[in-house]
Image: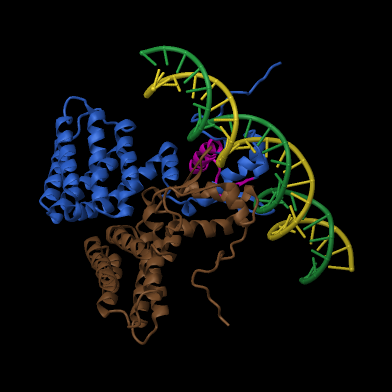
Chain colours: A blue, B brown, C green, D yellow
DNA sequence: CCCCCATTAAGTATGACTAATTCGTGTCCG
DNA sequence: CGGACACGAATTAGTCATACTTAATGGGGG
């Protein structure tokens, strides 16, 4: 009795739920361009290929369709859509693209988005931040200072992420706040994936301190300017690493 | 007899596909706060209430779950999540919220987002726009001038939307480009829903012409400044209409 | 050249079964 | 006597197989 395949898993990440596993396999494949736009998949084929029921395959396709990664039409099948159609703000799609071959382009898009959003968020934060948020900002800025030397990149990253998240949340704009996860992913990617063996630049650290100060002093213009420099540095850094 | 129910209709839009109809009913209900966070739905109950099979109900729930509007857990049911969890960038969610009771807040969030993104997009467009896009920009700006007097609001709107869409596309940033639909929805909402019986302000029209000129002359700073004034005007207008 | 019909794949429905999680109950130990 | 832990029953989502319906598409016949 060779009960084969009972535990052989094709997909590296084992999400819970069969449909989630299928999604975690199909989504990255599509965003990576493994199935070029126009490629037609059939749910029945997917079901047999992944050894799941048609029900499960259909549910995964439904989710992909809601992300505009595919389009399902009768008598035709499930057609892969071109990247222009994709919901590029969907956190799931962003994650998939950051993990795949599209990583560079995705990182560039997100960094430009940051350069637009974060300065404005900083200005709003200066107007609207609660005392607790001001304190948090200062705390994390000082944390960045403390961990900016001596190869403490992981600890530095924690403060960096928390700092930007607090600014975005303090802007009191739900759409800005939602970008916290995205910024976290970008910052984490820079530390973990890209070349960043050296300590952070002291200028960057100082700028974060400046933002915290400006917010505390309700100086919107200064907070915006400092944050703008931070995001411009991030873009410049990206151009140096991958021109 | 135009018996137009203001909220009595269970399935306002006849989407094709049962699951789409269920989604079109559940989604707006949730985003409108009709089911407060923590409310527990059961797929079986949904199936019987909407007279569809569990298969259909499950697919709709899957999509809602992918938007983080609900969370599905065994032995518990389908729990409605708080607004902070929602994928507020999902075009579907945006549409639902703009159509429901959350309209004001949603419009405000989106206008702030515009004020961050569009100026930066205008600067990038000045650097990267193709000759065709420059021509399109000029054409639509002139179209706005031509339709800015004499109660031609609908025609004006068409040019306004096309103008902003072109700027966002010309920025060569996929995430900016994706906001074209959102901006279109905001502009259309301003014309159709809000009080806007009077002709557009001539200053606004001139500013659009300025942006087009600046982009054509590759003057990023001027394009950004003009667009920033446009979006600031939009925010001011919102404050006047709904303080 | 157009219309009709056969084909195909998605969409829907149903029933049976699995699995995970919660909650209540009962027992054992302190 | 009381609390903590463990076990089991109940509940609900998850999975599967199958049969049937619907709508496009493409080809064949008039």
Please report the residue visible at 39 percent of the width from the left and 49 percent of the height from the top: B82
Left or right: A213 in relation to A121: left
Q: Quadrant of the C terminus of chain A?
A: top left
Task: Quarter of the image for the N terminus of chain A: give it.
Answer: top right
> In front here: A7 or D1?
D1
The furthest residue to the bottom: B150
Q: Residue at x 65, y 50 (%)?
A: B53
Image height of D16 relative to B191, above or below: above
Spot occupied by residue A43 in the image (x, y as percentages of width and height): 65, 44
Tell me which segment is drawn in magenta: A20-41
Q: Is residue B26 covered in magenta? A: no
Nearer the observer, A202 or B36: B36
**Does the magenta portion include A34?**
yes
The quarter holding residue B20 reads bottom right
Give left or right: position of A240 versus B91: left
For residue A182, what is the image quadrant?
Answer: top left
> Is residue A199 something one can see in this rendering?
yes
């Amino acid at each position: 009795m060779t009960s084969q395949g009972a535990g052989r898993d094709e997909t590296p990440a084992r999400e819970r739920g069969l449909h989630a596993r299928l999604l975690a396999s199909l989504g990255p494949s599509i965003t990576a361009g493994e199935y070029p736009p126009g490629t037609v998949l059939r749910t029945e084929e997917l079901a047999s290929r992944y050894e799941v029921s048609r029900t499960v395959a259909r549910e995964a396709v439904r989710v992909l369709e809601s992300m505009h990664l595919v389009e399902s039409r009768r008598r035709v099948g499930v057609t892969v859509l071109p990247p222009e159609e994709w919901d590029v703000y969907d956190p799931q799609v962003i994650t998939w693209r950051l993990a795949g071959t599209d990583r560079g382009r995705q990182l560039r898009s997100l960094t430009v988005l940051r350069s637009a959003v974060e300065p404005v968020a900083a200005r709003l934060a200066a107007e609207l931040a609660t005392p607790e948020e001001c304190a948090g900002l200062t705390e994390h800025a000082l944390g960045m200072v403390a961990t900016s030397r001596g190869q403490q990149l992981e600890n530095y990253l924690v403060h960096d992420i928390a700092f930007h998240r607090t600014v975005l949340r303090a802007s009191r704009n739900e759409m800005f706040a939602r970008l916290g996860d995205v910024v976290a992913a970008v910052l984490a990617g820079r530390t973990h994936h890209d070349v960043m063996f050296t300590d952070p630049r002291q200028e960057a650290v100082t700028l974060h301190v400046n933002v915290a100060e400006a917010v505390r002093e309700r100086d919107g213009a200064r907070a915006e300017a400092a944050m703008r420099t931070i995001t411009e540095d991030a873009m410049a850094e990206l151009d140096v690493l991958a021109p």
